[in-house]
Each structure stands twice: as C-alpha cells, then as structure tokens.
C-alpha cells in the first residue's frame, strides 16, 4: 500500500475512532462505565486529532498546489487564508509566500530593468531594497551590468556620433564637390555643345564660302583667260598695224618710184614732143622739097604728108600723155597724203595697241595672281572647314564626355546624398538602438 | 470615506529596508493577497483584508490625482512607481515606495495587479510630501471632485515640465 504519511495518519485515526466508538458502544451495553469513559476520551481525542490533521492536510494541499504552480513557472499564486494554521505549518505557508514574493519581486524588477535597458533607458535598475541574500547579490550584479552598459553605450553613442560626424563632414565635402562637378560638367557640356554647334555652322559656312571662292576663282580665271585673249588679239592687231605701217611705207616708196617714173616719162614725153616737132618740121621741109622735084617728088610728097600726120598724131598722143601724167601726179599726191595719214593713224593704233597689250598683260598677270590667291584662299578655307569639322567632332566627343561626367557627377551626388542620409539614419539607428539621441 | 471621519494618530510606522510589503488585487482593486509584512504594518488580519478595496489603507493626505495616474498607468499595462502615504488600522501612518505592475496571463491580458512596497528614504518622502501637500491643496480648492483632480493633475504635469523629466525618471531621482 503506497500511502502518504498523512493518509496513514488519517487511516490510523480512523481506526482509533472506529475502535473508540465500538468500545464506547460495547462498554455502555455491558455497563462497564469506566471502560466506556476511557473509550469516550480516546474517541474525543481521535476526533480532535482528525480535525487538526484536516487543517494540516488542507495547509499542505494549499502549499502543495501553490508550489506546484510555482514549479511550473506560475509565480503569481499565493497561499491565502492561512489564519487557521499555526506554528511550524503556518510558518511554512508564510515562508512559501515569502519565497514567492521575493522571487516575483526579483523577476518583475529584472523584467522592468531589462525592458528599460532594451529601450536604452538605464536609470531603471533593480531596487536593492527588499531583496535579501542571493537575490540581493544577483540584483547588484545586474545593476552593475546595467551601469556598465549605460556608460559603454554613452561612449559608443558619442564615438558613433563623432565617427558619423567625421564621415558626414567628408561625405558632405564629397557631395559639395560632386555638386560642383555636376555644375562644371553641365557647363562643360553646354560649352562643348555650343562649340560643336558653332563649329558645325562655321564648317558649313566655310564650306559654302570655299565653294563661293571657288566660283570666284573660276570666274577670275575666265576673266584672266578673256584678258589674255584680248591681249593676244590686241597684240595681233598691233602686229597687223605694224605690218600695215610697213606696207604703207612700201606703198609710199612705190608711189615715190611711180612719181619718179612719171617724171622720167615726162622727160621722155618732152623728148618725144621735141622729136615730133622736129619730125613735123622735117616733113614740111620734105614736102617743100618734093614739090620742087616735081613729078619725081610726088611719091615722096605723099610719104612726107604721112610723116607729118604721124608727127601730128604723136604730138597729140604726147599731149594726152602729159595730161594723163598730170592726173597721175595729182592722184599720187593725194595718195601720198592719204598714206601719210594712214601711216599716222596706224602708228597711233600701234602705240595704243602696244599700251593696251602692256596693260592687258599686267591685268592678265594681276588676274592670274588674284586667281592663284583665290585658289589659295579656297584651299585655306577648305582646310579651315576641315579643321573646324575636326573641332566639331572633338566638341561632340567633348559633349559626350561631359555628358558622361555629368551623369557620373549626378550619380555621385545622388549616391553621396543617399550616403549622407544613410549615415544619419545609421547614427540615428545606432544611437536610438542604444537609447542615446 | 470623508476625511474627517477617519482616525489619525500622527504616529509614523516604519518597516525594515530588507522587507517588502506585497499585495495583489483583482482588476477592481479588491485585495486578493496581502503578505505578512502588509498585515503587520497595516495592523489588519488577513481575513480583514481579503476582498476589501485597496483604499482600506488610504490616507486622507494623499492627493487623488496620484492614484488616478497610478491606475491609468497600470491599466495601460505599464509599471509605475509612487511614493504613497498609507494609514494603518489604528490611524498610524506609514510611507511606502510602491511599485505597482499589472500581471498578465499567457494571452497578454491583465488578470490582476501586483504591488511591492519598499521602505522609502526619508529625504524622498520629505520632498514628496511637500509636492503632495500642494496637489492636495489644489484639489481642495475645487468643490467639484473632477475639477479638483483635473487641476491637480495639470499642476503635476506642470511640475514635471519644469523639472524636464518624465514621471518615472522624476520619481527615481527623488
């Protein structure tokens, strides 16, 4: 039989009570009064013992129940209505309550202190008062730990804030630099863009100008060619004029020769006239002589008459010749005068055309120079256009590079701002995490 | 309980600094447990305390706004510390530094309140009694209880505002 001491005591008291009652009954029936009195005392004692045992049992059950709850972690339960319990049992119940009071007080204090510590508030420590023995020692230990945590978090917060401040200063400087860089690269991009656009314009204009100059050059070349042709023609005219002058000179000489020949013809005509007069005179003499010869002379007279007719015809012919020569002389004089005038005119033309030739030669050379210069200018302009195109290309590259720098600077600025915020949040988190703001 | 109807002897009781007065109340403030230090210092038997309202040991010199703050705090699930003047059964008085906390069940619901009271330091109760006297005077200036309590609560908030500390830190600094 596995019974507790109390149960065994209950059983024993029950047996004693039953025996007592039976004994009282049998002794009263048999009239044994002394035995009945003794049995009655035993019975009464048994009843009292049963009552006290019941109180002890109840107290034990209460204590057992509270301790059972406490052993399961329920520290809230207490033994109440312990007024009936006295002595060691009552003291035991009070001690159970004391132990639980102390334990619960300790756990609540520890909870509160830890709860505040979790929020970074270290002023809330476990109250030492009311704690005794090892509870007090543990409370002191926890309080020391809290004090240490407090000072460490204070130091940590200070250092974190200082580090955060340092990082922030650096990152702010970085942010400022990034912002500056952003602004500069934006400016750069604009400038590069503008110069790209402008150089493209210039290149286009230079190209156009080059084309225009080219047109001018070819026009100048045409002019030059025209002038050269004119010069050649003028030169040709001058040569022709010179040839004309020579020919006129020749004509003049020819006419002089003609005049001389005419004069000589006049002399010959005079001679012929003299011969004809002489002949006429001779014919007359012959006629006279023929007449004196009579008949014999008659044939001679006919010949003399014929000679006389010939002499007369010769005289008339020479008169015509003289007239003709006179006309020739007059015509020749006119021709000489005209030739002299022509000579003068041709000479004028010659000198004028020489002057023109010189001038046109100069003009042609000037035009050639101009044309060459214009070609040079055109080439230079093409070169400029090419260079400017290169510049535009470079500016485009610069624009692109500036754009990349701008994007990078923007990105950097943004990242720096984010980093700044991050640092702020980090310091805040660190400080709030340890309860220091 | 009218102020003039309670007996006051002016005698102050004390208890040891390694003792705690412990009591537990149900949600309505009725005592469900009082330890033997409570019984000894208050002069009440356990049977006289169980089921009674906690105000059984209330001293008339306590301003009502302190209890209002106390109940508001613990009903919101937080702990509170307060210096409280109590009245023993025979009219004697005793200062306690009370720490009152709600007790929660497993689901987090408040099932009871628990109070540990420690023997306070003399200089703290001296400062507190001056403040309480002002608060009480403020409450007594108003015929209406609610108005009086509102006025004294405002006064307490102002005092805390001047000190620049939250209530709990203020209490600990005393």
Image (tube, helix red, strand yellow):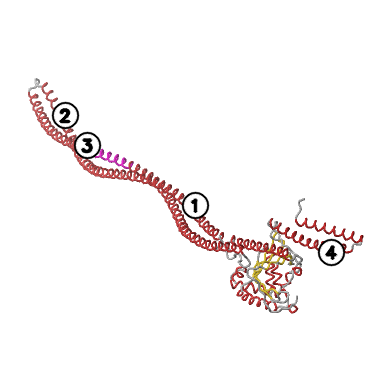
Answer above or below: position of A109 versus A200: below
Q: Residue at x 84, y 62 (%)?
A: A43
Magenta stretch prevailing secondary structure: helix
The disc label shown at residue A313, or none: 2
Residues marked 1 and 4 touching at CB (< 8 Å): no
Residue at mark 1 shares a chain with residue at mark 3: yes
Q: CA distance from mark 3 to mark 4?
A: 198 Å
Q: Callout 2: residue from which chain?
A: A
Q: CA distance from mark 2 to mark 3?
A: 46 Å
Please name which of the two marks, 2 or 4, marks the residue nearer to the observer: 4
Q: CA distance from mark 1 to mark 4?
A: 106 Å
Please provide the residue range marked out in magenta. A222-239
Look at the numbered disc 1 and give the secondary structure of its residue: helix
Q: Callout 3: residue from which chain?
A: A
Residue at mark 2 shares a chain with residue at mark 4: yes
Please name which of the two marks, 1 or 2, marks the residue nearer to the observer: 1
Of pointers 1 and 2, the one earlier in the residue sequence:
2
Q: Is residue B145 left or right of residue A348?
A: right
Answer above or below: position of B116 versus B61: above
Q: Callout 4: residue from which chain?
A: A
Of pointers 3 and 4, the one earlier in the residue sequence:
4
The disc label shown at residue A411, or none: 1
Foreground of the two, A219 or B116: B116
Q: Residues within 10 Å of mark 3 (few under 14, many from 20)?
A: some
The disc label shown at residue A85, or none: none
Foreground of the two, A403 or A353: A403
Residues marked 1 and 3 touching at CB (< 8 Å): no
Check disc 4 and report the residue beneath it. Answer: A41
* Rendering coords of residue A28 (x, y %): 91, 61
Of pointers 2 and 4, the one earlier in the residue sequence:
4
Answer above or below: position of B143 versus A255: below
């Amino acid at each position: 039989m596995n019974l507790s001491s109390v149960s065994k005591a209950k059983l024993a008291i029950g047996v004693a009570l039953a025996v007592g009652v039976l004994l009282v009954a049998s002794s009263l029936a048999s009239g044994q009064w002394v035995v009945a009195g003794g049995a009655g005392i035993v019975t009464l004692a048994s009843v009292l013992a049963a009552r006290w045992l019941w109180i002890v049992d109840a107290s034990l059950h209460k204590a057992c129940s509270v301790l059972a709850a406490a052993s399961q972690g329920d520290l809230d339960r207490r033994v109440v209505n312990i007024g009936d319990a006295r002595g060691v049992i009552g003291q035991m119940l009070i001690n159970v309550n004391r132990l639980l009071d102390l334990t619960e007080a300790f756990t609540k204090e520890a909870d509160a202190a830890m709860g505040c510590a979790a929020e970074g508030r270290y002023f809330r420590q476990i109250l030492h008062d009311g704690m005794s023995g090892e509870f007090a020692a543990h409370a002191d230990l926890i309080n020391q730990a809290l004090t240490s945590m407090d000072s460490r978090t204070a130091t940590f917060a200070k250092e974190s804030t200082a580090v955060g401040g340092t990082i922030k200063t650096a990152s702010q400087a970085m942010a400022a630099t990034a912002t500056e860089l952003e602004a500069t690269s934006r400016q750069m991009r604009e400038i590069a863009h503008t110069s790209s656009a402008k150089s493209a314009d210039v290149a286009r204009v230079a190209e156009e100008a080059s084309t225009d100059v080219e047109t001018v050059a070819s026009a100048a070349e045409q002019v030059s060619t025209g002038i050269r042709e004119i010069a050649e023609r003028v030169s040709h005219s001058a040569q022709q004029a010179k040839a004309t002058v020579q020919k006129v000179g020749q004509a003049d000489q020819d006419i002089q020769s003609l005049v001389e020949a005419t004069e000589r013809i006049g002399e010959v005509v005079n001679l012929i006239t003299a011969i004809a007069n002489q002949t006429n005179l001779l014919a007359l003499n012959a006629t006279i002589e023929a007449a004196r010869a009579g008949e014999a002379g008659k044939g001679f007279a006919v010949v003399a008459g014929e000679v006389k007719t010939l002499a007369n015809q010769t005289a008339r012919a020479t008169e015509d010749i003289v007239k003709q020569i006179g006309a020739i002389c007059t015509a020749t004089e006119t021709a000489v005068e005209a030739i002299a005038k022509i000579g003068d005119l041709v000479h004028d033309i010659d000198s004028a055309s020489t002057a023109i030739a010189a001038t046109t030669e100069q003009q042609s050379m000037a035009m050639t120079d101009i044309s060459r210069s214009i070609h040079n200018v055109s080439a230079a302009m093409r070169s400029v256009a090419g260079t400017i195109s290169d510049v535009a290309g470079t500016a485009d590259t610069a624009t692109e590079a500036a754009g990349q720098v701008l994007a990078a600077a923007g990105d950097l600025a943004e990242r720096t701002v984010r980093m700044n915020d991050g640092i702020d949040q980090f310091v805040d988190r660190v400080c709030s995490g340890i309860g220091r703001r | 309980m009218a102020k003039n109807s309670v007996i006051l002897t002016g005698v102050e009781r004390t208890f040891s600094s390694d003792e705690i007065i412990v009591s537990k109340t149900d949600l309505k403030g009725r005592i469900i447990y009082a330890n033997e230090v409570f019984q000894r210092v208050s002069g009440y038997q356990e049977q006289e305390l169980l089921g009674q309202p906690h105000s059984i040991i209330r001293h008339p010199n306590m301003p009502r706004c302190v209890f209002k703050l106390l109940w508001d705090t613990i009903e919101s699930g937080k702990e509170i510390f307060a210096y409280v003047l109590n009245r023993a059964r025979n009219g004697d008085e005793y200062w306690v530094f009370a720490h009152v906390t709600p007790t929660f069940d497993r689901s987090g619901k408040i099932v009871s309140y628990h109070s540990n009271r420690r023997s306070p330091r003399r200089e703290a109760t001296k400062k507190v009694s001056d403040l309480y006297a002002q608060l009480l005077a403020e409450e007594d200036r108003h015929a209406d209880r609610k108005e009086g309590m509102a006025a004294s609560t405002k006064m307490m908030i102002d005092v805390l505002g001047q000190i620049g500390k939250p209530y709990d830190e203020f209490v600990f600094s005393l």
